[in-house]
Image (tube, rainbow, N blue to C red):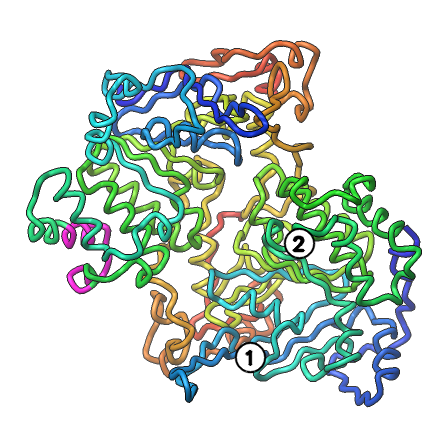
Amino acid sequence: MAELDKKDEAVDATPNVTDIVKVDASTTTEVEAILDAPVDRGEPILQVRNLVKHFPLTSGILFRRQVGAVKAVDGVSFDLYQGETLGIVGESGCGKSTVARLLMTLERATAGEVFYKGQDITKLSGRALKAVRRNIQMVFQDPYTSLNPRMTVGDIIGEPFDIHPEVAPKGDRRRKVQELLDVVGLNPEYINRYPHQFSGGQRQRIGIARGLALNPEIIICDEPVSALDVSVQAQVINLMEKLQNEFNLSYVFIAHDLSIVRHISDRVGVMYLGKMAEIGTDEQIYEHPTHPYTQALLSAVPVPDPEAREHRERIILTGDVPSPANPPSGCRFRTRCWKAEDRCSTEVPLLAIPERFQGLDSPVAHESACHFAEEKDVVGAA
Amino acid sequence: MLLEVRDLQVEFKTRDGVAKAVNGVNYSVEAGETLAVLGESGSGKSVTAQAVMGILDMPPGRIAGGEILFQGRDLLKLKEDERRKIRGSEMAMIFQDALSSLNPVLSVGEQLSEMFTVHRGMSRKDGKAKAVELMDRVRIPAAKERVGQYPHQFSGGMRQRIMIAMAMALEPSLIIADEPTTALDVTVQAQVMDLLAELQRELNMGLILITHDLGVVADVADKIAAMYAGRIVEQAPVHEIYKAPAHPYTKGLLESIPRLDQKGQELYAIKGLPPNLMHIPPGCAFNPRCPMAQDICRSEVPPLFDVAPDRQSACFFWKETLDG
C-alpha cells in the first residue's frame, strides 16, 4: 500500500497565509512544481470565490439568441481544508451538483474563481488543467449508470492510468488495480468481472476505487449513497471515512440527506437557489441554525423516533422552489419565508456573520445570509 | 378487519429459475389505521402490495398460495371484472414516480374526471367540475386554471398531490402508498405526508405505507411490518419497535442510520448483502448476515413467535435480541 499512502508532508514549508496567493505560472513545469508543493495544514486546499454558472436560455431555430439564463450557481464562496469533509446540502435545483461539476472543471464557470493551492483552476487549460484534475476526483451518484457496462472492473479502475500514465507504469497497472480493489473491500480476484455482476453497494465501491486510483487530494462526492439500500449505505459511509483517515483526503460531500451529511461532515453549507444560505461547523448548522431556510429544512426531516413526533415543532414551507431562470429579487428565500419583510425584496443579504452575533464566542456566530437571523433549535438536540 | 393478507406467496418465473419474492406474508389493516411495510429493495414489500391491488404482472408473476381478505371477501377468488370494480373505488394506490404514472398526453383534469365518468357514470362536464374540486382539496393553487394543464407542467410535489387526488377521488376505504415521497425533497415530503395524513383522518381510510425510510415510518405509522427476503421478520406497534427491536435485522437497521440530532461515532453496518431471491439461504434468510446466528438458524425456518400482544418476531433468539 506504500504507493497509495500520501507522503508525509512538511508542515512548515509554506508560510501560513490566509489571503489568496495568486501565482503567475506561465509554463506547465512551473504549474507542476506548484502542484507538488506541500500544503500547510492551516491553509485551505480549495478556495471558491464568487463562483457563478449561468446556463443560457435560447430561442429561435436558425438565429439563436439568448433570451435569459438559468442562474444555477450565482455567487458561491467557501473554503475546503485538507483532511476535512465539507457537506453541501440543499433541495433539487439548488445548484449543488453544478458546484460539483464546476470544481471538477467539467463545466466552465461564467465568473468567479476556484483556487487550488493558489492557482485559479477555472482559467487553466491543456496540460496544466490535466495536472490539476489528477488531484481532484469525483464519485458519482448512480453506480448503475456511471460504470461502463462493457468494461471489466479492471479496465474501469485502470482507465485513469491511461490518461495519467506517470502514476502507474504499464506493467504495474494490474497489481495497482488489485490493490485498489482490496482497499475498498472487494476481492482482488474480481478484476475481470463486469459491473452487472456486482450489487449496488459493490458498484459504488468500484466507483470509489476509480476515484482513488490517481492518489487525489480532493474527492468530490455527488450523492454517493442515495441510490443504495439503508443497510448498505452504512457500509459505504464507513468505508469513505476510513479512506479519508488513511489517505488524508478532503471531501466535498454533496447530498440531500441531512442526517448522513451531519454524520460525515466537519463543516456544512446549505444552498438555496444557487446561493449559499448558511455555512458553519456541523454543530453550528444543526444545533444553532440561524437562517430560516436551514431551520425549515431541518425541521422537515423525519426523525426515526416515534416519541419525538408529538413534541417536535415542524415548519412546513408553503409552495415550491422558484425557477432559477427568474429568481426572486433580494433574498431568494423570501417568497417562502415567514419572516420576510420589505427589506428582503430589495436588499440581497450577504453571507457573513450577522451583525448582532459578531464578536460572540458562541456557536450562533457563524455565516448566515439573512437580515433577520436568529437562533432556533429545531432538531431538539439540546 | 378491513384487509387481511394470509400466508401470501408470490413467485416469478425467470430464465434462471423461480424467484420466490413473497414467502408466506401475513398482515392486516383496520379502517383509519396506518401500517408501514418496511424493507429494502427485493424484500417483497412492493410485490405484496401489487398482489393486493391485483396489478401484478402475470406471467411472469404467479400467486402460489394464500388469501387476501378485503372486507371479508377473498380477492383472489374474484373474477377480473369484479376486481376491477373494487380497484379505484374501494382501494387505490399511490405510486412513487408520479411523472411516469400519469399519462403525459392527457391533461390532469381529464385523468381525474375519468375516475368519475368511468366508475360513476357521470357526464364529462360534471366530471370536470369534480376534478377541480379534488384539486382544491389537495391544495393545488389556482385549480380552475390548472385543470387543463398536462403533468409535465406541474412540479414534483404538485404531481404527487394529483396522484393523491386521483387515489382518493372515489373515497376508497384502503389506500396503498408505495414510496410516495421518495422522489421528493424533504420540505415537499413534509407537505405531502401531512396532506395524506389529513385526508386519511377525514375519510377514516386504512393506509398501507410502503417505504424504506425509518424516519417517515416513525412520523406517521401506527404499526410496522418489517420484511426481509419475502417474509415478515418483525411486526409491532410503532413505539415498541423503535424502543426495543425484537429481530436482529430491524435492530441492525435502526442502528445503521445516522441521526440528525446526534453526531454519531462509526455507523453500525449490517455485513453482507440481501440474498438473491433465487437462492434464499436455508433456515432463517438473514442468518448469513446475522451476528447472533446459531446452528438452528441455518437449518430451521423460524416461525413468527409472539413477543407480546400484537407483536411478533421471526427469530429464535427474540428474547436475547429484545434484552439487548
In front of the other: label 1 or label 2? 2
Using the image, tell me which numbered label, if any, was put on residue A148.
2
The relative height of residue B308 versus residue B153 in the rendered view (above or below) is above
- Residue B271 position, x and y percent, is 69, 32
Name the residue: 41% across, 18% down. Answer: B8
Query: What is the three-letter code of the residue carrying label 1?
Result: Val
Picture residue at 61% right of the left edge, 57% below the top:
A282
- Magenta-drawn stretch, dominant element (helix, strand or loop): helix
Cα–Cα gap, marks 1 and 2 = 31 Å
Chain letter behind tag 1:
A
Query: In the drawing, does residue A28 fall left or right of residue A68?
Result: right
Q: Which mark is residue A52?
A: 1
Q: Residue at x 39, y 38 (%)?
A: B178
Expressed as whole percent of the image width and height from the top left, the position of residue A69 reads 44, 80
Note whether A27 is above or below A38 in the view shown. below
Residue visible at 28% across and 57% down?
Answer: B105
Letter of the chain that mark 2 sits on in the rendering: A
Residue B99 seen anywhere in this rendered image of the structure: yes
Nearer to me, B231 or B308: B231
Residues in magenta, as a range: B131-145
Secondary element at tag 2:
loop
Disc 2 marks a residue whose amino acid type is: Asn
